[in-house]
Image (cartoon, grey):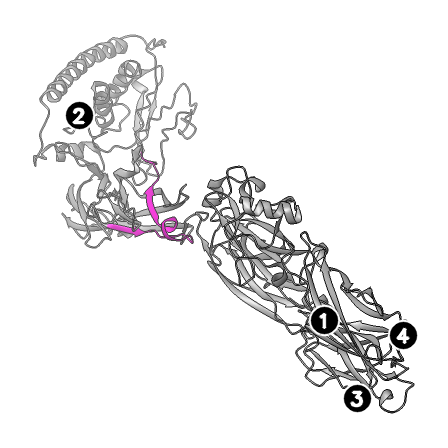
Amino acid sequence: MAPRGQLFPRSVRWRLSCILGWKVGFLILLTFMGDRVAGQIRYSIPEEMKKGSVIGNVAQDLGLDLKRLRSGRARIVSGENIQYTELKTDKGILVVNERIDREQLCGDVTPCSLSFEIILENPIELHRVTVEILDINDNAPFFPNKDIMFEMSESATIGAKFPVESAVDPDVGPNALQNYIISPNNYFILKQHANPDGSKYAELVLQKPLDREEHPNLPLKVIAVDGGNPQRSGTVDINVSVLDANDNAPVFNQSVYRAVVVENAPKGTYITTVNATDADIGSNGEIIFSFAKIKGSTVDVFSIDENTGIISVSGLIDFEKEKKYELRLEARDRGGLTGTSKVIIDVSDVNDNLPVINIMSFSNTVSEDAHLGTTIAVINVKDVDSDKNGQIKCTIDKTLPFKIQSSLTNYYNLVADQHFDRETTSEYDITIIATDSGSPPLSSSVTLQLRISDVNDNVPLFDKNSYSAYVTENNSPGVSIITVSARDSDWNQNARISYFLEDTKISGNPVSNYVSINSETGVLHAVRSFDYEQLKELHLSVKAQDGGSPPLSSNVTVKIMIQDQNDNPPQVLYPVQTGGSLVAEMVPRSADVGYLVTKVVAVDVDSGQNAWLSYKLQKATDRALFEVGLQNGEIRTIRQVTDKDAVKQRLSVIVEDNGQPSRSATVIVNVAVADSFPEVLSEFTDFTHDKEYNDNLTFYLVLALAVVSFLFITCLVVIISVKIYRWRQSRILYHSNLPVIPYYPPRYSDTLGTGTLQHVYNYEVCRTTDSRKSDMKYMQPMSQSLVSVDGDGADTPQVEKQLSGNCSLMSTLVSNIIVRSQFNRCSCFFQNFNLEQMARLWLSIAPQCRCPWCWEGRLVNFVAMFFMPSFTR
């Protein structure tokens, strides 16, 4: 390990300072792209560093702390089979993992660099690291052959050139082959030349004519020297054999030949033909073609026919390894003279390599609410072909909510292009296709399976917009009424629905007093027994809430209608039935067939057919006299009333509803068949069945009758006295000061509806200055005249005033002479009559005599004039 603050061990530092004096530098380029961070670092190190040697502090250079390296699971990704470097995440440094031989890694390519990527996750970061491998002078130049044999004619001219086999030095730059040195001699000098690729080769140049007889063999030594420090060298021994004179060397017809060969061309494929001529004849003119060795492996790829000069393919041509071949040609005659040229063979690329897809990082689950541009995966695609054959285009299905974005070279990001909806699609199979631009194009693909995690973004939805249910009244508490159901298209806990009743009021009471709901099943139960007559329907709101965070909910209206049962019997409103009172309807004996006696009025608080009422005559004193309307309850006569018919008629009417089973009520109707009230009174006075008289009311009634009797006798005495007095007077007319006040009795109307019979009795009273000529005339009842009870008196019959002498007409309309109980407060026949009404009643029924001159008529007339003012007050 290097000491603290030093990058390399001491041995390495000494080696670097002594040999190369290299410098380590780095270039950091940070690029921020959306939610990715891409950086690029460049280091320079010498080759042959020991394993574990520090290359650089990655964490410091990238601005990352060690916790980020560990939490992001930082790792090195490279496409090489050999992992030359290693990332120490606990220290944040990059160290050498394997021996790095620049010559083995890059050959003669400069600069030589090693590139790889460092990937961090959560969030994804991608950083490219380039390590430049600097050459050290660790290889000495060497010649492929240790001994070189030259045969030269003694006739070789001064300046003749003899190429020397080139030395090979795997190092590059200043450490590569720099110079050739020839051992001292009198005949040759060494001239250096450079190839287009920068390599150097040497030629022996004859400076002095050869003399085979003096020196048949000339031993030479050539030294190849590089430019390293310390300098390294290689030596080859050259043995020059001087031959007999061959004055002309072969000459190529072109100094440079060019040809093109297709990659992967089969062996034996023709490339080109080279040609050379020699002016000599015989064996000195026979030319042999060959390649001059430049690189050890290149000559194995091609072959040349030594006689014809045809160059053909002899090995595997791979464009990805070598794009161009430059070969030196030799044409040697039998005399040893050589002509040189070169051929440049360009290799045309063939689209023979599929793109290679590598998944650098991939999250197989993404949230449903992921933002647009969220990186799903990072992929690396490589194609070793060149030009169009190496141009790659990555595509995915356009219907998928993703897109491919290019980041670094050969790196692509798969990002979200649309918002996800797990309820629509919960899983995606993403096939990434990498296609090059060759002809025909080659492609490769990889399929990623991505799952969408759920987010609570859907409210529960009820199956219906509103619910309606029916429940029969008098139900048992706890009975199931209706089931509400909601669906949530989310998943798992987000789709778990609970049901609740909204806090509302029904008739001032909480809804929980009436119904409850099962929070899991949505079943509504009745908490109490319902009564249709009190509550006909319930309107409540049910909330469905899911189990997400935060929870979502929706409401639905539920209408529960109470169905009626026939649990209430009909109620009779009229005639009113009381415990101690007598109700009677009066029918005149002159009533015709179909005469409306009264109408039974009943109601049923139930509804529907349970409230349809029918009326039947159950019992009657005389069934042949009355009938009851089945639907309207009207009691009518079915024959003419005769004198033989009993005054007291007792009818029992049953009222039934239409329910199942039906319920009924019975009402007793008392009918009085009579033309006048006294007849009715005399008959009904003996009514003793179940009558309970009020003691106080009886007392007042007796008192009233006594007072009336007293007043009657007093008035009678006074009248007789006055009449006698008047009779004795002369027939001189006098003006009576006793006022005549018409009497209008109280009007009774049926407050319970139609069906009450209204009878009008008319009395005509004529008064003159002579009391003996006064008269009261009883008129026939007018059953068709009605007396209105309206306050404005619009329908009150007007009293016609007929002027006949000094007579005035007073019409007294007595309506509703029906003995009945008012407002259900009476307990006997006369309970509703006060003293004033009793007097009026007496005045109505007393006069039976219609003679205008009898004393009874005068008495009635007097009583009317005397009492009416007080009564009206």
Residue, disc 2: 831
Identify the residue position indicated by label 4 in the image. 209
Q: x, y percentage for residue 28?
A: 63, 44
Frontmost residue, 517 versus 339: 339
Q: Within 10 angstroms of label 2, few (less than 14), some, or many (20 or more) residues?
A: some
Is label 4 in a helix, a strand or a loop? loop
Task: Answer with the quarter of the image where residue 78 lies.
Answer: bottom right
Camera-nearest residue between 284 and 856: 284
Going from the N terminus, do you reach mark 3 or mark 2 first? 3
Q: Amino acid at mark 2?
A: Gln
Q: Residue furthest front?
A: 214
Earlier in the chain: of badge 4 and badge 3, it is 4
Which of pointers 4 and 3 indicates the residue nearer the eye? 4
**Image coordinates for residue 312, horizontal then vertical, percent:** 74, 83
Mark 2 and mark 1: Cα distance apart in space: 167 Å
Three-letter amino acid code at the position of disc 4: Pro
Q: Amino acid at mark 1?
A: Asp
Q: What residue sits right under mark 3 in the picture? A: 307
Residue contact at pointers 4 and 3, CB within 8 angstroms: no
- Residue under the image location 90 percent in, 82 percent down: 248
Mark 4 or 1, nearer chain start: 4
The residue indicated by pointer 1 is 237
- Return the disc, 2 or 1, that comes first in the chain's sequence: 1
